[in-house]
Image: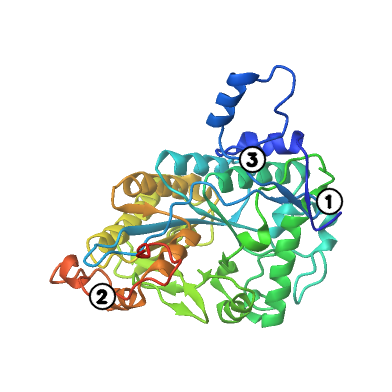
Amino acid sequence: MAATQRIAAGAVVAAVCAASLAGCATGNDDSEGGAAGPQKAKAAAQAPPKRVFRLIGDGSTAYTGAQPHLPRAERLKPGEKPPQFVVFSWDGAGEDSQKLFSHFREVAKENHATMTYFLSGVYMLPEDKRAEYRPPQHSPGRSDIGFNDEQGIADTVKQLRLAWLEGNEIGTHFNGHFCGKGGGVGEWSVAEWKDEIAQAKKFVKSWKTNTGMTKASPLPFDYDKELVGARTPCLEGQRNFMRAASELGFRYDTSGVNEQLWPRKKQGLWDLSMQLVPFPGHSYEQLTMDYNFMVNQSGTRTQGDPAKYRFWGDQMREGLLKGFYRAYDGNRAPLIIGNHFESWNGGTYMRAVKETIEQVCNKSDVRCVSFRQLADWLDAQDPGTLDKLRTLNVGEAPKQGWQDFLNGHPAPAPKGVPGAPAAKR
C-alpha cells in the first residue's frame, strides 16, 4: 500500500467522523433520502467544514487535518500576569479492565482540561508478535511490562482516537520499560535511543497489520508529526535521550526532576521535567508523581495497609495542592504532574489526582493543558519575558506586582508567531 492514499466515503471515514467533534464529509450528498433543492443548499451551508482524510501506511493511522480543540497560543501583553499552567500526564497510557484511561478522559472534559498520554508502544503489539520488538541490549521479544492482546489493543486505540479528537496529546513512554543496570535505559547510547523511538512509532503505525484488525478505524493523526515529546522509564537515560530527541525534531522532554521554576531549553528541547512539591507531614519535598508518593508511603508494596489508604490519598492531594498554590500565588511557574493508570493502594492516588483536577482546573486564570500546548505557549513568548520570569524563585511573586514586573517593552513577535500584532497596511 502506498505511504499515503486518499479513500472514498465508507465505513472507516464514517467511524472516525462519528467520533470526531469536528465535521467530515463522506461525499454521498446524492444518496437516497438526502436533502434536495433549497433544503439541500441550506443544509450544505450549515454543515461543518470538510476535513481532509488520508490513510497512512497500512491504515493504522491517518491524516485528518489540524487537531480539533486546540486554542491559539498568544504572547503575553506588557504587564499581563501569566496564566497558571498545570500539566497532568500519564505514563504508559493504555486501556485495560480498570478503564482508567476512559475515566480520566471524562474527568478532563468535565473540568475544562486537556492532558498528555504517554503511550507505551508495546501496548499496541500483541503477545504473539512480541518478536517484532528488538529492544536495545536485550533479546528480541523481551519487555518488562509485557505486551497486549487484541481486545486490549482495540480498547486502547479507541481511547487514543477519542483523546486526540478532544484536544489531548499522544506522546510516548517508549516500549519495554527497562530500568536499572543490565541494559536499562540509563545505559543506552544515542543510537540505541533512536532505534527505540523508531520502534515505538512503528508499533503505533502498524497495529492493524500486527493484529489483523484491518477493518477497524484508524488513529486520526500522523504519528511522525504528532510525537513531539516523551518521558523516559523511571526518569533514567535523560541525557542521551535528549540528544537523540533533539536530532529527531522533538520539542520537549519531561524525564528529569526540577524545582517549581519557569522552564528553559536544554539541547534545543523545552525541559518540562517533573517537579518537587511539599510533602505534608515531612520536612522534605516530594516528586509530583503517584509512584513516588506510594514508595514513600507503603514502600515497594503496591497494596499496603488498607486502613491508611484514605490518609495516603489525602496526603498526595494536599501535596499537589500546596505545590499548586505555591506557584499560583507566587512565580506562576507551570506545575508538572505525572501519573500511571494503576490502582495502587486501593486506587487512592487516582482519587487524589481527580480531586486535584476538580479543584484547580476550573479557575478562570488556570489552564490545564498538554505538554504540546505548554510548549506552544512558551514558543510564542518574547524571550526577554521568559528570562525575566526565570529570575523569580520558587513561590516568589514579583514584589512590585505583575503589572510593573512585566511592563517592559518586549520585542515584537516574529511574523507568523501566534500573538503577533497584525501587520499595518
Report x, y in % for residue 305. Answer: 46, 49
Left or right, 207 with respect to 298, comes to right
Q: Is residue 296 visible?
A: no
Judging by the rendered image, the residue that carries numbered circle 3 is: 97
Determine whether label 1 and label 2 are within 8 Å by CB: no
Q: Is mark 1 on a helix, strand or loop?
A: helix
Residue 12 image offset from top left, x and y in percent:
74, 38
Residue 87 in the figure: left or right of residue 160: left
Please state the horizontal and vertical placement of residue 324, each as a whole percent of the image: 31, 58
Distance CA(mark 3)–CA(mark 2): 45 Å
* Label 3 crowd bin: few (<14), some (14–19), many (20+), radius 10 Å: few
Q: Which of 273 and 35 is in front in this view?
A: 35
The residue singled out by tag 1 in the image is 209
Return the residue nearer the eye: 134 or 159.
159
Which mark's residue is nearer the viewer, 1 or 3? 1
Residue drawn at (29%, 52%) of the image:
365
Q: Which of 360 and 3 is in front in this view?
A: 3
Give neighbour class at mark 2: few <14, some 14-19, many 20+ (Cα, 10 Å): some
Q: Residue at x 60, y 81 (%)?
A: 243
Residue at (71, 62) in percent of width and height: 201
Q: Pointer 2: what residue?
A: 392
Instruction: Say which amino acid is labelled 3.
Output: Ser
Q: Identify the amino acid type marked 1.
A: Thr
Viewed as shown, does residue 127 lie left or right of 160?
A: right
Disc 3 to disc 2: CB gap under 8 Å = no
Q: How is the rendered protein coloured? A: rainbow
Where residue 353 sits: x, y (%)? Answer: 42, 49
Mark 1 touching mark 3, by CB under 8 A?
no
Q: Please, is residue 88 above or below residue 388 in the view?
A: above
Badge 2 amino acid:
Leu
